[in-house]
Image (cartoon, rainbow, N blue to C red):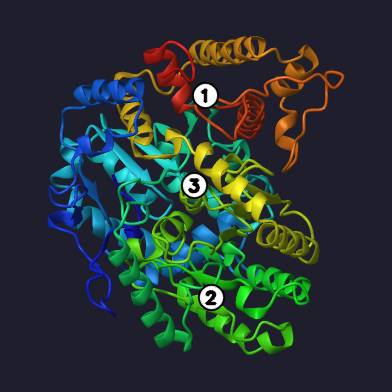
Amino acid sequence: MFPPPGSIMYLTPHSVGNITRVSVGYRHQVDVDANGQTHLEDYQVGTSKGMWDTLMHLARLTRDKKLKYVVKPNPAVFHVTKRKFHNVLQGVAPKSVHLEDQDKSLWETWTEENVERYWKEGPFQVCDVAIIDDPQPSGIIPYLKQVNPDCKIIYRNHIEIRSDLVSDPTSEVHHVWNYLWEKGIKHADLFISHPVENFTPANVPDEKVVLMPAVSDPLDGLNKELSPIDIEYYWTLFNRQAFDQIGRRVDFWNRPYFIQISRFDPSKGIGEVIKAYARFRRAVHSEMVLAQVPQLVICGHGSIDDPDGTVIFEEVLAMLQGEVHLGISGEEKFVRPTCSESELGHIQDEEDISLESIAADIIVVTLQLSIREGFEIKVTEALAKGVPVIAYNSGGIPHQIHHGRTGSLVNSSLSCHTRTSQVARYMRQLILDTSLYDRMSRTAQESVDEEYFTVFNAVNWLFAANAVVDGSLPVNSDRAEEVKCIVKDAQVKLFEELGVPESVVGVLMGGEMGKGSKFDVTEGGGMEWGNEPHGKCRYLTERDVIEYQARNRALSGEKYLLVKDLWQTEYLGVVGSE
């Protein structure tokens, strides 16, 4: 696997101020199992039997060694790959940004150097399947095909590509995408994208495309359970860095807070977080005493291949100069902490706060006001911790949030003033209505299923790797239609079992669920259906889940197959079976 180098941080949070180090070995290989400290069996707890059995079956099929490599860092190249590839494709780059010939030459030379120095002799020669993650290393694909024509290549697109602008020959998005396509991506055997139909440019052959969401790891530092003393340590560590950077600390112990955890990036809407918070503060000025008013925390790690992080962070600090005029002086805390996952994971954890009785009445609300987004795992992680999320309905985020149940979605196509005003209104509701917060918190924990975590993801990838080698991926048109029919038949059968009115079934199956951030089924003459609890859920009804699943199917579209549909129909017999 050849991802960009942003995911190879060596985490050592045991001393304040410790800095990130890149930890790679021979040929820039990454130790993907923490040097033997992580074991597959650790993930069996909380995994359904059908899922675990499928994983074991696929693991037996994939007996060969799995290795992960990263490219050699080069700041000049990262300036090109982040600002002129990534930002342009997302549609967040300034209009003045253009991919020039010298940029192309720099990237192509760097790509060839990595190939010649690390992988041409050795890994390329013995590789059965290569997964290329991100446009940054996509230039190695032709070299790999030349050295090893039998190697199957999977390209993973993990960002929101403005495919509408790709189709406009006058746009820079069109220029950049077609350059990358011709230089490497078109030679991939399989193209994996997030489950949003319009993320895939029109020139990618339909039969090559399958969809798969991003996931989080329940056992990493962001999500694992910590003792009260460890939580206290990470809060103290965070505050030490906050004081070093902005001269302020967060009162985790006594006051509620809103939090957005994200990279300091043009697409993350950080400026709009500040504007929404200012509107919220003005709205509650006469309703709450200062000690009860939530703080605002904005934080996130940088990445060694992202030159935008420091620039955006400095822009945010400059906004502090105007906070007196916004009426929020001293209440905003912006931090770029050292790369400790546990440090971030446990400032977004309402469960840690309440269960350990450090401050049982403290409320935490997560914000995710990304203007462009692929699939935001911070949303998944917040919901899994019982933290309601207020977010823009950008990219794949509507897949993750039940609007009105686990959080609130705001239409990102509205004007900045309108959408930040709506965000402020939802912030006020959650803070002043504790029963609403409690209900959303409990529903959030029920709503996050195993599809967005490690084992399900491992099954997706192992299936895709084996299928591309044995030739069953890409799928032919007959198999694609067969799978789509099985999926639809299974859905209709479930609707019938729940007593869903026929007129409602037509809406659910007709793709209308994906047209808005909120959809309320009102067809069927007011008939009640699906109001029983869903499985073991206390707060989610069958109706909630069916509407949510139908909306997600509409967002994914009918053009491409989900990887999960392929292996579920093959191994489990019916879609969604456990």
Query: Which one is in front in this view, the residue at disc 3 or the one at disc 2?
Result: 3
Residue 197 lies, in percent from the top left, at 61, 35
Q: Secondary structure at mark 3?
A: helix
Q: Position of residue 216 (x, y in %)?
A: 40, 46
Q: Amino acid at mark 3?
A: Thr
The local crowd at label 2, few if under 14, some if 14 to 19, many if 20 or more residues have their Cα within 10 Å, is some
Dot 1, crowdedness within 10 Å: few (<14), some or many (≥20)?
few
> Mark 3 sits on what residue?
380
Looking at the rendered image, the disc whose residue lies closer to the viewer, 3 or 1, is 1
Nearest the viewer among 312 and 169 is: 312
Q: Which residue is mark 1?
A: 535
Task: Give the foreground label among 2 and 1.
Answer: 1
First-in-chain label (2 vs 1): 2
Q: Which residue is mark 2?
A: 312
Q: Amino acid at mark 2?
A: Ile
Q: Position of residue 416 (x, y in %)?
A: 76, 65
In percent of the image, x 36 and y 28: which residue is there? 464
**Residue drawn where x is 37% and y is 56% of the image:** 222
In the image, residue 410 sits, relative to residue 280, either above or below, namely above
Q: Element type at marker 2?
A: helix
Find residue 50 and report its image quarter. top left
- Judge left or right: residue 316 versus residue 142: right
Which residue does the image show at 34% across and 30% down from the upper left? Answer: 47
Placement of 56 over or under 304, stated as above or below: above
Q: Quadrant of the C terminus?
A: top left
Tell which of 418 and 84 is nearer to you.
Answer: 418
